[in-house]
Amino acid sequence: MRPTERKLTLALGHNGYKLTAQRRSVLKAISNSHEHLTPAEVHERVNQENSKIGLVTVYRTLELLSELGLICQVHREGKSQSYTLAPSGHHHHMICSECGTVADFTDCDLGELEARLSRETGFEIEGHLLEFSGRCGDCQEQAGRNADD
Amino acid sequence: MRPTERKLTLALGHNGYKLTAQRRSVLKAISNSHEHLTPAEVHERVNQENSKIGLVTVYRTLELLSELGLICQVHREGKSQSYTLAPSGHHHHMICSECGTVADFTDCDLGELEARLSRETGFEIEGHLLEFSGRCGDCQEQAGRNADD
DNA sequence: TGCTAAATGAAAATATTTTTCATTTAGCAT
DNA sequence: ATGCTAAATGAAAAATATTTTCATTTAGCA
Ligand SMILES: [Mn+2]
Ligand SMILES: [Mn+2]
Ligand SMILES: [Zn+2]
Ligand SMILES: [Zn+2]
């Protein structure tokens, strides 16, 4: 059993949820992709396989997996919600604007900035959203190759 | 003329766009609020006044004002797009999760982090999204007063 | 093996955003 | 000032996204 599947089994059991084929398919689709996927994209990919599950179930499952911390949301300007596999614990995303690949990083180091803002504005800070966008190594290479032609 | 209106006149003229009553109303609704407003909310507020403008025009106008740098988008988990008045230049938001107030700050100081990520992952970083969420001073006070009762 | 609460999915409802196109109007040239 | 024209508007419809409802199925347990 793949480590992601094992996590799913544990997280579901722990919280009184049932392990279903649909839930396994959704998580598998996400963990098989390095990109962030919208509910519609997950649905499409799952249904290309044998399974055929309903879009409503995809929505419900994405919300559940997100709650369990197995996947997390990616925020793109103007785009609809999309999800990617979550490493454990606090982390952030770098997103390739060309191919959609998501890379995680953990040490955001915003403590000092938070403290200063809190002091200066009186806000009590509870959380933050930090994402970088750019071009991944692969897409840069590809652009380089095309320029060479 | 209020400074925001002056900016609007200049930005529109500069770019070959026309100054219309609708555009003034939309910008006014946003600049009159410290909260971030969705298209539907902007529409509602504008139409409470004399004017009565179409929701489609609100959508189009928000996009235009955003392009011109007069307003900017706020990103909330699971919520639909919303906008707030933009100070000039690069900046970020702190958003009160209770009342929706948005406060801006400018010095995000992510250069070092960017450089390290770029070095370690090969990503070429082009931009970032940084938002803090928490409770504004007012909402903390109010909570304090309620606890006192 | 059977029971039951949880999960699923089809359909409908609701919400959000975009497109189309006929009508109006701001800004400019006269 | 007046008329012209490209840009802007708005009503309606279409497209897209998300949620609710409820009858049916099923995972996990006794
Ligand atoms: Mn992540
Ligand atoms: Mn802003
Ligand atoms: Zn890429
Ligand atoms: Zn507040």
Image (spheres, coloured by chain):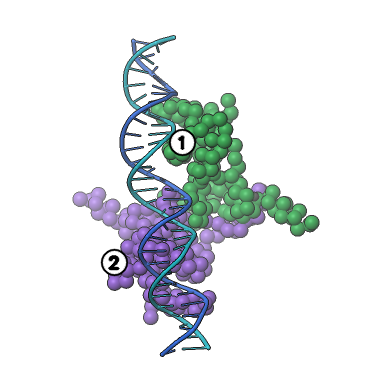
Chain colours: A purple, B green, C blue, D cyan
Q: Circles 1 and 2: CB distance less than 8 Å? A: no
Of marks 1 and 2, the one in the foreground? 1
Residue A8's disc is none
Extreme residue toward the left, this view: A149
- Mark 1 lies on a secondary structure that is loop
Q: Is residue A13 left or right of residue D3?
A: right
The amino acid type of the residue labelled 1 equals Gly
Disc 2 designates what residue? Answer: A48
The chain letter for the residue carrying disc 1 is B
Q: Where residue B122 sits in the image (x, y, percent)?
A: 38, 59
Callout 1 environment at 10 Å: few (<14), some (14 to 19), or many (20+)?
A: few
> Badge 1 is on which residue?
B54
Percent across and percent down for residue A104 are 44, 63
Whole-percent x, y for residue B62 in the image = 47, 39
Q: Callout 2: residue from which chain?
A: A
Q: Position of residue B46 (x, y in %)?
A: 54, 35
**Residue plotted at (38% across, 56% down):** A96
Secondary structure of the residue carrying tag 2 is helix
**How many tags in the picture?**
2
Mark 2 within 8 Å of ligand 3, using the beta carbon = no
Q: Residue at horizontal 31%, vertical 67%? A: A47
Report whether mark 1 lies on the same chain as mark 2. no
Seen from the viewer's position, the closer of residues B119 and A24 is: A24
Q: Amino acid at mark 2?
A: Gln
Q: Quadrant of the N terminus of chain A?
A: bottom left
Q: Quadrant of residue C9?
A: bottom left
Residue in front for this viewpoint, B44 or B128: B44
Residue drawn at x 75%, y 55% as measured from the top left: B146
